[in-house]
Image (cartoon, rainbow, N blue to C red):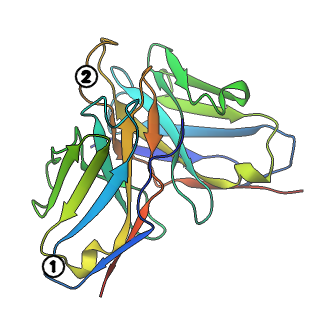
Amino acid sequence: QSALTQPASVSGSPGQSITISCTGTSSDVGSYNLVSWYQQHPGKAPKLMIYEVSKRPSGVSNRFSGSKSGNTASLTISGLQAEDEADYYCCSYAGSRTFVFGTGTKVTVL
Amino acid sequence: QVQLQESGPGLVKPSETLSLTCSVSGGSITSYYWSWIRQPPGKGLEWIAYIYYSGSTNYNSSLKSRVTISVDTSKNQVSLKLSSVTAADTAVYYCARVLIPAAPSARYYYYMDVWGKGTTVTVSS
């Protein structure tokens, strides 16, 4: 499978909202509501932020939200904070009980 | 709270086999799937494989011919072997608990909810 496509970087000022896209195909993102999002700070392990497109695990701020339209999933961060500066990866079910990750997006808080 | 700890040699020679272990603590390895994911320096995440505590496995097709994943329930450990390594296999290797429904046709879960801190493996002579 080919990696899902994400913008290399997205930036915003504190308090603003930003959206990260994750584009796949009809074989992965488009066919299943099984997209998850992970936050990764430098030198740290990824952390689950969103699962099943729009569900938040316990303890994750409600400033993080997810959605999907067609072959593209999106992660929106509202009220951007300095601590949100990190890399973000999407991941989708890709059929046959397999996974495919996105290319990753670096979020910069200006 | 379940914790995962990866371990293994930090340096592997080209053409040799990379062997890593993931130790699960704070919870049982049973009733869950366990996965390996890697991240080359400065690059993105790549799913490698997963295994159920019963031994059922699934692999990334691009690595399948070189990868073996196994589980030892008595030790609460999951292992990864990657053969014929090259410099392209240099990466941080993560172990993660992955939620997968028991029924293959079910369309829920499919995400990694607990991750280890990762272990760096360099392939070099």
Residue B53 in the image: above or below residue A31: above
Q: Residue at the location (46% across, 29% down)?
A: B76
Mark 2: secondary structure: loop
Q: Residue furthest bottom?
A: A110
Give the residue pinned by disc 1: A16
On-image quarter of the C terminus of chain A = bottom left
Mark 1: secondary structure: loop
Q: What is the chain letter for disc 1? A: A
Amino acid identity at mark 2: Arg
Q: Which mark is residue B107?
A: 2
Amino acid identity at mark 1: Gln
| B99 vs B54, nearest the viewer | B99
On-image quarter of the N terminus of chain A = top right
Q: Is residue B117 left or right of residue B26?
A: right
Q: Position of residue B89 (x, y in %)?
A: 71, 48
Q: Quadrant of residue B109?
A: top left
Q: Residue furthest left?
A: A62
Classed neighbour count for the residue bearing mark 1: other residues with Cα under 10 Å, few (<14), some (14–19), many (≥20): few
Classed neighbour count for the residue bearing mark 2: other residues with Cα under 10 Å, few (<14), some (14–19), many (≥20): some
Q: Position of residue B66 (x, y in %)?
A: 73, 29
Q: Residue at the location (47% across, 21% down)?
A: B73
Q: What is the chain letter for disc 2? A: B
Q: Is residue A80 left or right of residue A29?
A: left
